[in-house]
Structures are given as structure tokens and as C-alpha cells.
Image (spheres, rainbow, N blue to C red):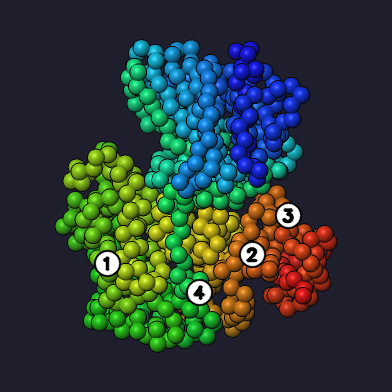
Amino acid sequence: MTDVNRRSVLKVALGGAGLAALPSVVPGAAPAVAAPHRAPDLVGVGDTSITLEFDDRLHSRVALGGVDVTRFDAGEALLVGDGAIDEFAYGGHETRRTRHSRHGAGVTVAVWGESATGVRKTVELTSFRRLTGMLVMKVAYTNGTGADLPVTGWRSGAHELLEVPGGFYTFSGTTYEDRRDWVRPMTDGFDQENSLGMDASDYGGGTPVATVWRPGAGLSVGHVEPVARMLRLPVRRTAGGASIAVEGDTPLTLKPGRRLTTDTTFLTALPGDHFVPLQRYRDYMADIGQRAPRTPGPALEPMWCAWGYERDFTVEQVVATLPKVREVGLKWAVLDDGWQTNEGDWELDPRKFPRGDSDMRAFTRQIREAGLRPRLWWAPLAADPESDLYQNRPDMLLLDREGNKQRVSWWDAWTLCPAYQPTVDYFVGQVKRFIGDWGYEGLKIDGQHLNAVTPCYNPAHGHARPEESTEGLARFWKAVYEAAHRADRDAVVELCPCGTAFAFHNLPYVDQYPSSDPLSSYQVRTKGKTMKALMGRGSSYSGDHVELSDGGDDFASSYGVGAVLSTKFTYPTGPDDGIVLTPEREALWRRWMNLYEENMPATGEYRGELYDIGFDKPETHVVAKGAVLHYAFYAEQWDGTVELRGLGRGRYRLTDPFNGTSLGTADARHNTVRLAFERFQLIVAERIG
């Protein structure tokens, strides 16, 4: 293919000046922005940020801002048996301008070629002006071998980000039973499969995005299907850098002449961490209807949860604590696990509510009389073995390929199928009772089994495909969400999938996204950065119980990322002495609640693009409220200068809002401040004049 460059090299630029398709590179001609390298046998596509070039084997190389960040890799491959078909002789390409009804203007390039065995590959790449740095990819393989082809899967977006000094970080949006950090350094030997399937019977799913990055450059991959898919997004530390890919592994026999089309995937090349790639993903998905709902005002109010008293709470304990909850400055009172007879029937425990519904209505009335909003804990889609629901309605059970039930480990219950209409109707009825009858104004929906489910083979359900359960979980949440808001327009639906990475397709039907049982303050902050990218300005991310943070009192980690403050203290005593609200703790809790109410960082715009959470030290987060910037710095101990990025024109007055001290002034050219602190430092930058 020595004449590919002469007749086929293509550069597609989507910049501020508009669309431009440059059909050939002529020696001596002015190059386009981020033009592909003038090497023989290349075909390229991209925008002002990303360029993807194909050689005559249809291997591809990624450039960021005109600088190569990968070698030529076998980016797309058909997996067959123990091997892969990953070399295809270039056959041609075509380009066309496109305008999507929602994504807007773009350019699509299709490139095709054929393997030595006769398999034809067609790669269709689309770049949209409003989604800089992102290429959307559809790949099709046609069996021209003349024989059956035993396909075991496919791979797309497979690239190795080349090494530079400094190392690598990675973000994984997928779920692990050990509840590991979503953002991690990639040490030698680092290897994560990142499956979107079920890691365990009740752990799985997630946001279908993975990122690897180094100082100044990062690659992200994922899928942009409108429903959940059980793919893998493996990332690995390699001898030459860090690798990433999207993989599907559904086996099939591809008949002669038949075509296999992969799920629609994407590749981004952008500087910085995972924040901007997640924004690109969010914007694309919003265009196809997967967007965050309007956030009810009450979802931004700080909350107290009775879980500090655990399952053996008494109603008297909870009610006696309410005045102190209000005094501290909290606005919600959440009744947690332990009010019910079992998971499944959701009847009131007669030891706590002997008169049944009338007692529960009286309880929510007491919460409101204390000046608080009542919220109820709930774990749907589970049925205990001793529940009437399990005994009388086994047709609701989710069964795997072998007919096995799916265990919910925490409650020793069984998972129900979310795509079976009787299941949906049953739990929608519960929502109507909780909000419409009992008087709750919000739901805390809890359980790792609520994030994703395995394909369902229960014959009673009549599924056209077993994957209907996986894809139908989001529709279950839609039914729950709509029922709650029909009962109370400003109801708050909180979904806490217990340590798992949030399944993105469920999130359009959720009002509040907690840090979900964080194991550290670092998790509170990194999950916060992630959720702010995915759900956008004004969304409600909660730091979860502050007692789960470092030291059990790190409100700073919630406040600094714009999270809603939350606590589960007990008063004056409780089963755990470590979370009792002592006079010293009460003074600290009040201080943070007052600061939160004064500045309401949860209503601001989280500026995650300004700092790299892996490589910028100290770790820094910024929330903008109009022209005011709220900075939060974190380190075990810091003594040195910090940079205030994002300042506009003019001079800014700098203050420490936590301690009420002045820190001088700064402007965009003189934007460094010397700080000495332990754990955290807050700075408010207000324009002068």
C-alpha cells in the first residue's frame, strides 16, 4: 500500500473555525490543526485535541495536540478461539459531514480492510464539534472466510499510553466486592479487569468508563449504549506504559457472509485526570436522554441518620435525639434499617410500631414537628427466605442460567427480577405507601444488589432475552422515581449501592448520590469528583456519614468537593461510644453546619478540570459560586506554596473561612500562596471591587 498517503490520507478538524475535511496532505501545504504526521501509508481522523491515524494494517496511533501518545496498536480485533484477528489490509475509506439531532455538527470517517483469512473489518468513527477530544466508534466484522467462524468476543479502543517520567493513574467506573478506590496509582504489575458484569451475586455494574493518564495526557474508553452492557474495560501497567481497551466476550458462531457489529464505544485523548472525559461521556449520554433530573431543593440540605443506633434502635431513642439534630443545624432525619419485619414484606415491626400504620404516621409527624424532614431507609428487590413474598411469589425471583437464585449477602436474601412487571408493581406500591400514606418526604434506598443484576432465565418471566433484566434495572428505578415524585413533587430519592461504583444508567432516576459507605476520606473526595463530572452542576452528592471518614470527623472532605454534609451521631448515649455527640464534637459539628449553610458549596459549579487529582500536590478541589472561588487543599501535612488556578480578571481577597483569617490577595498572574497546614486548608477567593 505504498500509495495510500498520496490518494487516501485524510484529516478531519473540528475547531472553533468550523468543520474542515482535508482530503490529502500535499508537501509544502499548510497543515491543519493537529494534522497527522506526514509518514507513508496513513489515514487519520480527529479534532483539535485527538487524532487517530490508521496504517495499512488498520493499526492505529493516537496523538494529543499533535503529539503521539501511543504507537500503532491493534486497536480493534475480533477474538477467535485463543487468538485474535487484528491485522486487516487497508481497503479504502470514505468521509462525510454529519449533523446529529442532539450532538450537533460532526464528521464521520469509515475505514475498511480485510484480513488474510477473508474477514472484513469496517471502523466508523465520528467526531462531534461540541465533544472535543472524543471519537465515537462503531466496528463491524463480516465473515468472508466461507466457513463458520467461532467468535469468542471483540476488542475496541485498545491502546498503550506511552511512558513518560512521573508514572500513571487510573480511574475505573466498575464495581469490585472489596470496594477499592475508584482512582488509583498504577504501580508495577497493576492489572484490573474492570468487568461491568457481576463481580459477585450482588456486586456488579458501574459507569462504563475507564481512564489511564500520565502527566499531561490521558486516554479513556467506554461504551455509549442507551442501556447497560456487560463488557470489560481492562487497564494494565505494561513495560512501555499503560494499556486500556473495551472488550466484549459473548461467544457466537458467525456464519459465512454474516456480520457482527460491536456495541458503540468511544475513545478520548485529553490532558488531565478522568474529570473531563467523564464530562464528555455525560454530555453524549445526555443527548440521548440519559441525564440528571432536576435536583429538588431539599436534596441539598444536610442530614442526620438514625443508623448510629443500628437495627435495635427504639422509637423513643430516635425521637429523643431530634431536638439535638435540629440544634446542630441539620435538616433531615433518616430512619434506617430495623423498622421492618423483613426484607421483602416491608411490614412494620410490631415491637417498635405496635399500632402499625398509625404509629408510623405519628412518628413522621414528630419529625416534622421537630423542624426536620423525614426520610425512610429501604432495600427493594430483595426477599428474605422467611418473608411471605418469597414463600408466595417465587415467580418474582431472578434465576441465572443454571436456575440458581442470586443471593444478597448482607441480608441473606434473594434478588428479585427488576424486569418482571409484577415485581415492579409490587415495589411501586410500597413507594406510594411510604410517601403517600406514612408521610415520608424522601427515600434512602440501600444495597449493593441494587446497582446491577445478572441476566435472568426465570421461565415465568417470558423474557425475549436473558439480558432484559440487566437492561431493565434502570426502568425499574424510573418507575420508583416517578412514583415517589407523583406522591411528593419535591421528594428526594437517594440511592446508595453500598460501596459499588454507580451504574450510570440508573442515575437519571436518582436525586441524591452518596459516597456510598466510603472506606476513607480519599474515597469521599474522589467519588465526589467523579459524581460531579457525571451528574453536572447543582446535582446532589452526599459525603455519607462523616463517622466513616478519617478520624470520624472529616467534614472538610465533603465540604471541599461540594458534597451535602451527613452524620449518624447518637445522643446522649448509643451502642458505639465513638460516635456519641460529645460537647467537643457538637461544637465542631455546629461550626461545619454553619459554614455549609453560609456558603452552600453544593449549589456551586465543581471545577474539576483545574487540578489533576493524581499528579497535582497538594490534592486540590475548587467550587465556583458566581465570581467567588472556594478552594480546598488536602495533605497529611503541607508546608509550601499552592497555586490558585481559575482566577479571572482583577484582584481577589483571600480568606480562610474555617478559621476566619485573612490570607492576603492574589490575581491570575500572581496566584500562589504559601500555606502550612495539616489535613486540610480552605481558601475563599472573592474579587475586590
From the image, state whether disc 2 or disc 3 is nearer to you. 2
Question: What secondary structure is marked by label 3?
Answer: loop
Q: How far apart are marks 4 and 3 (CA)?
A: 31 Å
Q: Left or right of 336: which side holds 589?
A: right
* Circle nearer the N terminus (2, 3): 3
Q: How far apart are marks 2 and 3 (CA)?
A: 18 Å
Question: What secondary structure is marked by label 4?
Answer: loop
> Please, which residue is most extreme toward the left here?
392
Q: Distance between the residues labelled 1 and 4?
A: 25 Å
- Is residue 84 in view from this perspective? no
Whether pointer 1 and pointer 2 mark residues with C-beta atoms closer than 8 Å, the reply is: no
Amino acid type at image mark 4: Glu
* Circle nearer the N terminus (1, 2): 1
Q: Distance between the residues labelled 1 and 3?
A: 48 Å
* Circle nearer the N terminus (1, 4): 4
Q: How far apart are marks 4 and 2 (CA)?
A: 17 Å
Amino acid type at image mark 3: Lys
Amino acid type at image mark 1: Gln
Q: Could you tell me how many numbered marks the image carries?
A: 4
Tell me residue 331's x, y (percent): 48, 79
Residue sitting nearer the eye, 531 or 627: 627
Image quarter hosting the C terminus: bottom right
From the image, state whether disc 4 or disc 3 is nearer to you. 4
Residue under label 1, please give it: 430
For label 1, count other residues whose C-alpha is less than 10 Å away and answer few (under 14), some (14-19) or many (20+).
many
Residue under label 2, please give it: 623
* Circle nearer the N terminus (1, 3): 1
Residue under label 3, please give it: 617
Question: What secondary structure is marked by label 1?
Answer: helix
Q: Residue 413 sits in which quadrant?
A: bottom left
